[in-house]
Image (cartoon, grey):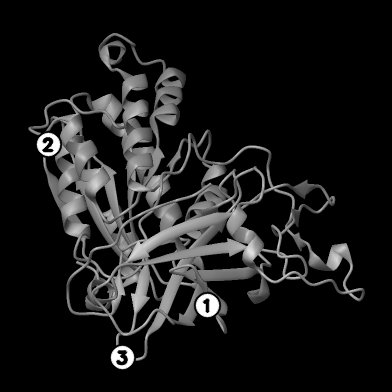
Amino acid sequence: MVLVSRLSRRSTSLVAGALPLSLLLAIGPPQAAAQTAPRTKSPHRTTAARQVHVPNRPATPLFQGIQGKQRSEVHVDPVTGVVTLKILVQDPKGYFIPNIRRENFVVYENGARQQNATVEIEHAPVSAGLLLEYGGRYQGLNNAVREEVSRAAHGFLEQVGRKDKIAVWKYGDTIEEIAGFAQPLDALDSSLAGMGEPPVSELNFYDALITALGRMHPVAGRKALLVVSTGLDTFSKATYQDALAAARQSNTPIYVINVAQRVQENIAVAGAAPGPYARLDWKRAEKELLELATVSGGRLYSPKSALNLTGIYDDLMENLRVRYVITYKSTAGADLSAPRSVRVELVDPTTGGPLEIVDANGKAVRSKLVVEDSYVPLSASEGDQ
């Protein structure tokens, strides 16, 4: 699988691209480019030693659909020529691949292999905005939504670290800030508890999502918008297509906790009359939530019970926080205005062929990984716009 994206950034820092380049495993034959790596044989290295071993994972991912492509993160120091790539390496089910060593990464820039690249793993602090559904036309439904939204929001706060920053907004017919990024983390629980009863109102999800994405745009560093919602919309000025365009153009991935299934089950258990709720298009709302998450580079989760939330948040935060960081000094020359191509591959250094990844049972993941990107050093050195 080849992922291609173009970078054109401008501002005043040394960061280009708000979100990282993803390395996704794709089954297929080795690319010709991989053959340029040196081929050597060592009698002292066994096949097992050359393999990357990963733990067994669930057969199906925790999120629905596929994760969309995330934006590239390329840092350039124009003085030293040092380039830093932050890369998400995951298997086809979306799980992070650990245990990949420095010698397994090969970097080419303008076709030339870059020597002396260093590789580290980064666990970055996160700036996350929480957008919480809190209102609607039916009070009974509002109360059921409030219970699930509150449980999901408090559960997320249990997963954040002391260096993370969290902002919270609730929406019904309008969006309202509950807590800003500057608020201490230990005060967020009380802020959520003080939101009060959800009013009877319109439910303008599209308007709220567009507004929240706009507020996330200037936030620096690793960031995401966590939407806890049914996805229902009753009277937004914006259309769904407007919201979809905002999600696609945003520099913020959207991770969705879809509480619709839990809400419908709670209503059924309570014996509420289905009359007014029968007009709600739950399937359409879920489809839209999935597409919004995908085009932004995020994920959609639909927990079946409160017990699923811990695993979901672990999955979400790993996907957001953890990156391989590759640093090398470019040999492309002094011209900072010419675009440069960069390609990263995972290889077995003893053969130059694809790196073999196996699970805990020794079953090989027969994969070939090639990633391509391009950047303009002058724009990249000016940072994220």
Query: Mark 2 against mark 1, which lies toward the viewer?
Result: 1
Per the image, label 1 sits on a secondary structure element best described as loop
Q: Which residue is more in the foreground, 208 or 218?
A: 218
* Residue 313 higher or lower than 181, as above or below: above
Residue corresponding to mark 1: 114
Task: Please report the residue visible at 31 percent of the width from the left and 61 percent of the height from the top.
Answer: 190
Residue corresponding to mark 3: 79
Q: How far separated are the C-alphas under marks 3 and 2?
A: 50 Å
In the image, taking residue 78 as reference, residue 86 lies left or right, namely right
Residue type, mark 1 in image? Gln
Q: Which residue is more in the foreground, 51 or 323?
A: 51
Sequence-first disc among 3 and 1: 3
Q: Quadrant of the C terminus?
A: bottom left
Picture coordinates of residue 81 (x, y %)? 37, 85
Per the image, label 2 sits on a secondary structure element best described as loop
* Residue 354 higher or lower than 289, as above or below: below
Picture coordinates of residue 263 (x, y %)? 39, 28
Crowding near the residue tagged with mark 3, few <14, some 14–19, many ≥20 C-alpha atoms within 10 Å: few
Sequence-first disc among 2 and 1: 1
Q: How far separated are the C-alphas under marks 2 and 1?
A: 54 Å
The numbered dot on residue 173 is 2
Task: Please report the residue visible at 18 percent of the width from the left and 25 percent of the height from the top.
Answer: 137
Tags 2 and 1 touching, CB below 8 Å = no
Tags 3 and 1 touching, CB below 8 Å = no
Residue farthest top in this picture? 275
